[in-house]
Image (cartoon, grey):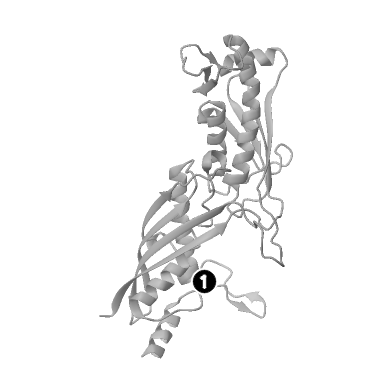
């Protein structure tokens, strides 16, 4: 048979954030408006990965209002505090923690006023939910966040909180090898099925099962989308993408010659969300951006080896390289 199938697996662990003791810090402001809505101000750049949605969800959960009532303002150096780069799979963890701290500070102002309005002392636990605050276990005795915020505005009080979070990491001691260069770590495993045409060297990725430990999936649909996107990017690294240089000049600077996977190349992807809550993360969340991409290429290379018995040692695994390896094996 010209076409042979194989299965490969790869597992990784990956340190989130800048690492090795470099200050990894995000700051945020959260303000509750007089109409009961809220504004989150944070410099975290949403490049399409959905970080603004996650920040809105975290603020809404902490304040006890609907996500639709949260406005997230980002990427404005005149209006938002610094949140670092949208890189290193860090925004959900680092900026998410900053938003939660800011929302919690604003919430305490609301709760102090709610205790007076509801006639309860500080020993009573309060619950914020769906735009209302009530004593724990007594949902009928409630007051709206809108009314609290409006009355505060009349008195000249702004309900605003500020939060800054720095990830915990330490430099590695070069003599002892001890240290905590990253915090936290993400884990992922992928199993890939491929079909290799021994006549042409072409590789088709049939199916990918991708499991990622994300701590807590704040937005599961978003996480599944990240996993699918990461798999496709890993496929490009494994099979297609290669920068061609000639005396320092790029020979293939456009997508007509620099090939990336298209929709027609996307295999059956089965994302598996593993939740092992990270105690230091916002509601237990970590990150998924890069960890979902890293295992794909080694899993594909292992699957090629399983299918036709040749080990490709440089990427991408082009048809020419596979045919050459098959020829050498023969």
Task: State which quadrant residue 157 falls in.
Answer: top right
User: Which sits in the foreground, 186 or 195?
Assistant: 186
Label 1 Cα crowd, 10 Å radius (few <14 / some 14-19 / many 20+): few
Q: Position of residue 281 (x, y in %)?
A: 57, 43
Q: Is residue 291 left or right of residue 19?
A: left
Residue in the image at 50% along x and 44% along y = 277
The reply to whether residue 235 is in sight is no
Q: Position of residue 124 (x, y in %)?
A: 56, 17
* Label 1: which secondary element: loop
User: Which sits in the foreground, 61 or 204?
Assistant: 61
Q: Is residue 80 above or below residue 140?
A: below
Which residue extends farthest front? 176
Residue bearing mark 1 = 257
Q: Position of residue 244 (x, y in %)?
A: 58, 76
Residue in the image at 56% along x and 67% along y = 254
Q: Is residue 238 above or below residue 288?
A: below
């Amino acid at each position: 048979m010209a076409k042979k199938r194989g299965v490969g697996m790869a597992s990784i662990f990956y340190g989130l954030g800048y690492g090795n003791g470099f200050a990894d810090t995000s700051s945020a402001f959260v303000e509750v408006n007089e109409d009961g809505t809220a504004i989150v101000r944070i410099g975290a750049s949403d490049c399409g990965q959905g970080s603004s949605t996650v920040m809105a969800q975290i603020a809404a959960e902490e304040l006890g209002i609907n996500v639709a009532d949260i406005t997230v303002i980002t990427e404005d150096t005149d209006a938002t505090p610094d949140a670092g780069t949208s890189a290193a799979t860090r925004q959900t963890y680092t900026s998410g923690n900053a938003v939660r701290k800011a929302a919690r500070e604003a919430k305490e102002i609301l709760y102090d006023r709610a205790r007076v309005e509801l006639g309860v002392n500080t020993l009573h636990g309060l619950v914020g939910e769906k735009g209302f605050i009530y004593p724990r276990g007594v949902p009928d005795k409630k007051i709206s966040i809108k009314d609290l915020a409006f009355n505060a505005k009349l008195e000249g009080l702004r309900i605003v909180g500020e939060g800054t979070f720095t990830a915990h990491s330490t430099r590695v001691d070069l003599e002892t090898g001890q240290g905590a260069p990253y915090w936290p770590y993400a884990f992922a495993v992928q199993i890939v099925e491929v079909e290799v045409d021994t006549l042409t060297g072409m590789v088709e990725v049939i199916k990918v099962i991708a499991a990622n430990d994300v701590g807590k999936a704040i937005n599961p649909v978003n996480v599944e989308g990240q996993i699918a996107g990461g798999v496709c990017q890993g496929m490009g690294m494994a099979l297609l993408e290669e920068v061609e240089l000639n005396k320092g000049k790029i020979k293939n600077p456009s997508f007509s010659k620099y090939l990336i996977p298209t929709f027609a190349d996307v295999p059956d992807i089965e994302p598996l969300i593993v939740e092992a809550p990270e105690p230091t993360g916002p509601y237990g969340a970590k990150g998924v951006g890069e960890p979902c991409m890293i295992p794909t290429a080694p899993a594909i290379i292992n699957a090629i080896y399983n299918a036709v018995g040749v080990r490709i040692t440089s990427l991408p695994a082009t048809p020419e390289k596979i045919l050459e390896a098959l020829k050498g094996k023969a």
